[in-house]
Amino acid sequence: MRRYFPILDWSRGYGRETLMADLVAAVIVTIMLIPQSLAYALLAGLPPEIGLYASIAPLLLYAVFGTSRTLAVGPVAVVSLMTAAAVGQLAQEGSAEYLGAALALALLSGVMLLAMGVLRLGFIANFLSHPVISGFITASGILIAAGQVPHLLGISASGHNLLELIGNVLTGLDGINPFTLMIGISATGFLFWSRGNLKKWLLHKGMSDLPATILTRAAPVAAVAVTTLAVWGFGLAQSGVAIVGDVPRGLPRPQLPPLDPDLWRAILVPALMISIVGYVETVSVAQTLAARRRQRIDPDQELVALGACNIGSALSGGFPVTGGFARSVVNFDAGAQTPAAGAFTALGMALAVMFLTPLLFFLPKATLAATIIVAVLTLVDPGALRRVFAYSRADGAAMAATLFVTLAFGVEPGIVAGVALSLFLHLYRTSRPHVAVVGQVPGTEHFRNVDRHAVITAPDVLTVRVDESLYFPNARFLEDFVQDRIARNPALRHLVLMCPAVNEVDASALESLETINRMLADGGVTLHLSEVKGPVMDRLRRSSFLEAMSGRVFLTQYDAMRALAPDLTARTLAACRRETQRAPLPD
Amino acid sequence: MRRYFPILDWSRGYGRETLMADLVAAVIVTIMLIPQSLAYALLAGLPPEIGLYASIAPLLLYAVFGTSRTLAVGPVAVVSLMTAAAVGQLAQEGSAEYLGAALALALLSGVMLLAMGVLRLGFIANFLSHPVISGFITASGILIAAGQVPHLLGISASGHNLLELIGNVLTGLDGINPFTLMIGISATGFLFWSRGNLKKWLLHKGMSDLPATILTRAAPVAAVAVTTLAVWGFGLAQSGVAIVGDVPRGLPRPQLPPLDPDLWRAILVPALMISIVGYVETVSVAQTLAARRRQRIDPDQELVALGACNIGSALSGGFPVTGGFARSVVNFDAGAQTPAAGAFTALGMALAVMFLTPLLFFLPKATLAATIIVAVLTLVDPGALRRVFAYSRADGAAMAATLFVTLAFGVEPGIVAGVALSLFLHLYRTSRPHVAVVGQVPGTEHFRNVDRHAVITAPDVLTVRVDESLYFPNARFLEDFVQDRIARNPALRHLVLMCPAVNEVDASALESLETINRMLADGGVTLHLSEVKGPVMDRLRRSSFLEAMSGRVFLTQYDAMRALAPDLTARTLAACRRETQRAPLPD
């Protein structure tokens, strides 16, 4: 029971010092979060106050169920993009159906996450390899940034994929609003500058480290304030600058998302994708931050927590949420000690939505677009593709495929393409395992690849080390390999399969071994095994293979050679003993 | 070029003896094939002569392109079932569209196989594990046999799955034709008896082995002849016994299958499934027979050959074909030496279709149904599920899933379910690898699991042997494991990752190793590697990990312990030397 309610753990010993640290962090995070929540709601195609609502209940629920001390949940860029892509196909942006579909998406995603957490299916997230995630996040960043450019220019353009978007922007260029463009360019420029240089400038001016960091992180708030004042002061709204407009005051009313079966069937796959992507992002962030403080997280409990957060978001008028990297790092750097910091942040957001929303009336959408663009372009890692490709062409191919398919067709096809390609390439590689013929390193009990080391082999004993588990993709490969070797080597009397790298022998491989055993016996060659792992041996004993096998199972390869080529081994060992007598080892 | 035309190989040295052997085999196989081809055409829902046509061109083409000396291609039970399932959804049985769709299916399948062969994609067939194939074949056998029971009873009933079929049979029982039932029961009984007992009886009567075998294999011909005579002699056709009827005489005219794009789109997936299943069956049979004679086959060329056979079948009015187990074994046992035996068989079938077809007029369909039932029930292996499950629950689950989904929903869903489950379970298993903490076996240079052997360990050095390649499904697992161990073990100063079982480190695992390196360094622990495989080391050198790693890479675990815990190792080695001096090894 304690596992499901981590609040019972960290709330022990909650004292005055921890409270102060959490409060300070909460204030800083709230200030940073207000513009970001508005921006991500607009990214998801929803009214801006929905972003504020989605930052209240989830943070409170995470404080109860979450295992990371510093993770902050709420709307994030990639999940907002996926929400817009999913809901945009089902309803018109701005309509009540659109909002209802977003709530349903959050509820369904929450239920899926909760179920996965209870069933301890957290390992499913591992099936997205890091290169696929990286390619997908880079492509999402590009898509998001490109999608915000029209807001910077004051034109209305959109597209289902990158090329369509670019085309619509180019055709709509004559509708640029100069004031919007000025606001957008200056906000973007300021935010890029502040990210790289503001802190250095403040430190140079004599400010100490922590306030400098905080001010740098609050730069978006400054941009929001200045541009809002400018629009209000100069009456730019009449000149065509799109503004946020009226944001309803007050807390969200608890509501149930629409329970239409057709709607739910339509959002089933997007909800699953959002759940998995959200979970992967949350766990990555949470583990990174936990490692810095030698803390642990419970990946399966994080599923439960995220599920609760999304259900809470749905019931309080929000949309799909997850742990966010930027906001969690801010929370961490601001000194948060426990998830109570997130709860206080939620209270701060609640106060903002109750009292501060009138101040947002004249906030230009171009400023929000600028904050999004600057935030996501930090996700784009251009050097990653080259690095990954240099290390592993298969991983590089999967990363490139994910990146291009996401840019061309959207997030869901991109992830599916990446995962499918990763799996296919992995199976392809294991279907052609590295097989080494090994011999004895003179003077030792070790056996190494004849192609890489100077080793001794016996003429009538062939030792083959298979560098892969034996299972269905490579079962036939071994049969072919053995058949080839006995054809080439008529003097052969023994074949030893050296198995230190064989972690599994599945049913298909077992049949192949039986075939190999018969094949060799027909040719007068005895089959032996050596260095079989404990778990593999346990399994083999449950079959009839060991009785049927013509030869023996040796614990070590050295034992095998002593039994099958005793003269050779004895000569080598005698040489070894003479060697050690000449140069005694240190005591 | 020679690779694509194996006929150039085996036709060398083709002399009189080989010719005689091939001719004898051809005669025997032709006799056996005639009723079987008729039966499988009916199974596919096609007119019986189509089965004869499909046994001519494919055999001739295989003689040119095939690499197996004894494989015989033509209509087989499972592919006929899949053809009926695919085409039955698109056209009415017996219509011209039905036949056109079957031709198109063969052509498309042939083109796919040819393309796969040229691209050397033969390894794809390895992705069907043996348990999945076994489950699918068993279920197909049950489905086929059940589908033939109405023909035995003289009623007309069918069903898309097993339960529907059983239901329709039970409701149609009042329409049983007693003569059909008698013919069906007696033919089935005779064929089952002959399969098990005829040979023994003939040998007992003094006949020698080869004629006895031949007569046993010709039992279906006897059943056909006797029942045809009975129907003709007693005029049973008027009493409601369904007969084959008029079979057109003469060779098939070359024809082009319909080239309708909608039709081709509809049969795209079934053609791919038929290609893969047909290829898997062909390669299994061909390799089994080749091994018996110490011959080799070329799996990628078999794809080319099978592609040519199917294209030839389509252009000569046939339907999808593949290498058949029963007919190939008969061919082998009858003494065939080269694929020329198949070519002569094709000539025999051509003669049959030109001259013998009037004899088939009164052939009762119940007899053909009996031959099918007896043939496929030998495919059903009830003990296999228990055996496989006892060895590997994952493989057993995949087999059971394939079996039940095939019975319930058909062959294509069954295969997809089986493959998906095999892959999922494999990934699940590798996402939780076996990780052993190892210590030194006293007196040796070997290191074994502390839980299974009595070994020596040093208090400040932890050696971890991961029994699995490091790749994306288990990348995070290792991070968790290491994090857990350093939390539990404050005295730790060195952690050695022993990698003899690590066959691959992909990009995701590389990032995990970098994370582990940093995590350990934060905690004051140095990370080392030992026994890294050559190919893995080559890869690691292409990254920056080795420079970043806090510790060293050791060639052997023993070297690592000598460097990191020299006192312990020296004491152990001294004990070893005293031991060997006491009991000298044999010279």
Image (cartoon, coloured by chain):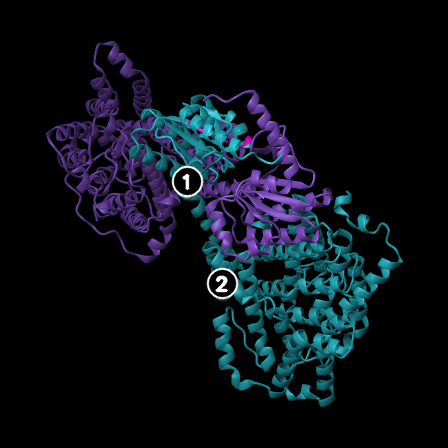
Chain colours: A cyan, B purple
In the depicted view, which residue is nearer to us: B236 or A353? A353
Asked if marks 1 and 2 touch (Cβ < 8 Å), the reply is no
Is residue B129 in view? Answer: no
Q: Residues within 10 Å of mark 1 (few under 14, many from 20)?
A: few
Q: Which mark is residue A386?
A: 2
Residue B222 located left or right of residue B421: left
Quadrant including the C terminus of chain A: top right
- The single residue placed furthest to the top in the displayed view is B205
Residue A44 position, x and y percent, is 63, 67
Name the mark on residue B289.
Answer: none
Marks 1 & 2 on one chain: yes
- The three-letter code of the residue at mark 2 reads Arg
Position of residue B97 relative to residue A571, above or below, is below
Disc 2 packing (10 Å; few <14; some 14–19; many ≥20): few
Circle number at residue A454: 1
Q: What chain is tagged by disc 1? A: A
Q: Quadrant of the N terminus of chain A?
A: top right
Is A370 located above or below residue B329 in the figure?
Answer: below
- Residue in front for this viewpoint, A479 or B581: B581
What kind of element bears circle 2?
A: helix
Amino acid type indicated by mark 1: Ala
Magenta segment, which residues?
Answer: A528-534
Viewed as shown, does residue A70 lie left or right of A97?
right
In this rendering, the answer to whether A464 lies above or below B264 is above
Quarter of the image for residue B178 reads top left
Answer yes or no: is residue A12 visible: yes
Q: Mark 1 or mark 2: which is in front? A: 1
Magenta region includes residue A533:
yes
Residue drawn 27% across and 27% down?
B239
